[in-house]
Image (cartoon, grey):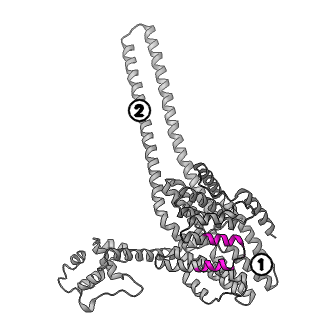
Amino acid sequence: MYHRSKQILLFFYSLCFPIIALASHTPQQIKEVLEKLDAAIARKVEYQTVKEKEISTLKQNLLQEKTDSLRSAYAYELSRIYLHFQADSALHYLHLHDKYKGEKTVASQITQAEIMSIMGIYGKAEEIFSTIAPPQDLEERRHYYRALRAHYGWIADYTYLDQAHYLTKMDMYRDSILHYAVDPLEKSISMADKLIMHGNPKAAIQELKTFSERSSISLQNKAYIYYTLQAAHEALGERESQIYYLAYTAILDLQMAVREYAALQKLAYLLYEEGDIKRAYSYLSCAMKDAIDCHTHLRTLEATKIFPIIDKAYAQEKEQKNLFEKRLLIAITVLALFFIVMAGYFYYWMKKLASMRRNLYYANKKLNSVNTDLEQTGKIKEVYIARYLEKCVSYIDKLEQYRRSLEKLAMASKVDELYKAIKSEQFLREERKYFYTEFDRSFIALFPHFIDDFNALLTEDAMIIPKSNEILNTELRIFALIRLGITDASQIAHFLGYSLATVYNYRSKIRNKAKGDKDNFEEQVMRL
């Protein structure tokens, strides 16, 4: 089927991407690997097209197959292929597998939990994992522990609350992988990961040296090795090597046509810190689009957290460049005007000399000189006008390149799904909820006694106590903004997404429940 072509690709990429010697990397090596990554991003649509053809072949086989046993096998394989490419499709084909199989197998349950974790539905994934006992089959047991290790690793990356608890669980399931793993490479990668987590990155690098000369390692395992190496160099503070291995990990992710990955957005932020704003913007835009197309909440959140920072820096860099070009254009224009004025000045004197009726020979000679000067001036004007037009064309070309890049991005996705994603407000609601939660935490960190002090201004029956799952509720959040000096009702309404009438009602309602001077209640809040 298509497995033979995959083996050929594996051999080819093994030659192109040998495990590089684990040493510090030079600026030239960094430059070369980033250029390779730029080329890989340019070919992303090509790589994804290859994967989509592979998926299309499997879908055709599924439709043509008559027996439920083979249908279930094809559906399960489609689910695994879609896993890090388009999570909702992975879930769809997993349900088809269960339907054709006539039951929900342990492997299917584990895969469903994996998909939920990738999509960021951690509560549902946790619920599914809680119903699965460690399987008796050793391969399924290894699958089970790998899924759990990844699940708790994602949660630890996602949350700031009780992070140590999830890291401990991740460590525990990594130990289970080490216990049951039969592949020496898997053991080494897991052991290196453990050594990094426990503060011994040099030993982690040494652990992976065993595989540095091998060329028969799968692309996926190479990506694991590179990403583990970058984590080790990050722990050692060796930024050049970290950038190097992140770049190679990102290249492999793109060539495997996966959309759920961490290397590219992490590399984008490092390059932003290094001052390579253009690449950082390009890499993060690519990572964000893939995360959205894959429907993976964690990677989308990671990208959107840092995108405004890089986008602002990129906009500032472009603004500075545009400002320089404008100043250059003004200077050229002024210079051209200067030459025109000078030409006019010379022309005036030539005319004046001519009017004095000097010797005709000298007059003609001077007139010829004036004509020559005027011709030269005309050429100068032509040169500067041409340069101005060239700059205009350059801007048009840049706009055209940008339009084409958007066209390519749009062609890489299904239009209906892209439209649904754009139309959906779920992401904005979740981000707004997350924003308010972060606001509440930050505010309470600044004013830890605000709730008690605020309630002290109210009558006993009017005290406001947030629910157990809240930090601040709506009333408290309004007066938290007032405490910060934001007293304008329209600003508060805009910040909280309420109407002006709603904000006025809340403020009036709470003010009427004040113990003392109701007219100066908000001034008292601002002094808390």
Report the Cα–Cα distance between label 2 and label 1.
74 Å
**Residue 500, quarter of the rendered image:** bottom left
| Mark number displayed over residue 337 | 2
- Find residue 490 and report its horizontal and vertical position in percent: 32, 72
Above or below, comparing residue 212 to residue 526 in the picture = above
Give the left or right position of residue 157, taking residue 450 as reference.
Answer: right
Give the left or right position of residue 314, taking residue 258 as reference.
Answer: left
Look at the image and tell me whether residue 238 can be seen: yes
Query: Which residue of the protein is positioned furthest toward the left in this rendering?
Result: 517
For label 1, the crowd category at 10 Å Cα-Cα, with few meaning under 14, some 14 to 19 and many 20 or more, is some
Q: Earlier in the sequence, mark 2 or mark 1?
A: 1
- Find residue 348 and report its horizontal and vertical position in percent: 38, 21
- Find residue 123 and report its horizontal and vertical position in percent: 54, 84
Give the left or right position of residue 293, taking residue 215 as reference.
Answer: left
**Residue 517, quarter of the rendered image:** bottom left
Above or below, comparing residue 125 to residue 295 in the picture = below
Q: Which secondary structure is most common in the magenta stretch?
A: helix
The segment highlighted magenta reads 172-192
Give the left or right position of residue 463, taking residue 278 as reference.
Answer: left
Q: Is the C terminus in the top left, top right, bottom left or bottom right quadrant?
A: bottom left
Q: Which residue was labeled with disc 1?
A: 62
Dot in front, 2 or 1:
1
Q: Which of 110 and 190 is in front in this view?
A: 190
Above or below, comparing residue 103 to residue 413 in the picture = below
Q: Which of 138 and 2 is in front in this view?
A: 138
Provide the secondary structure element on which disc 2 rests: helix
Q: Is the N terminus in the top left, top right, bottom left or bottom right quadrant?
A: bottom right
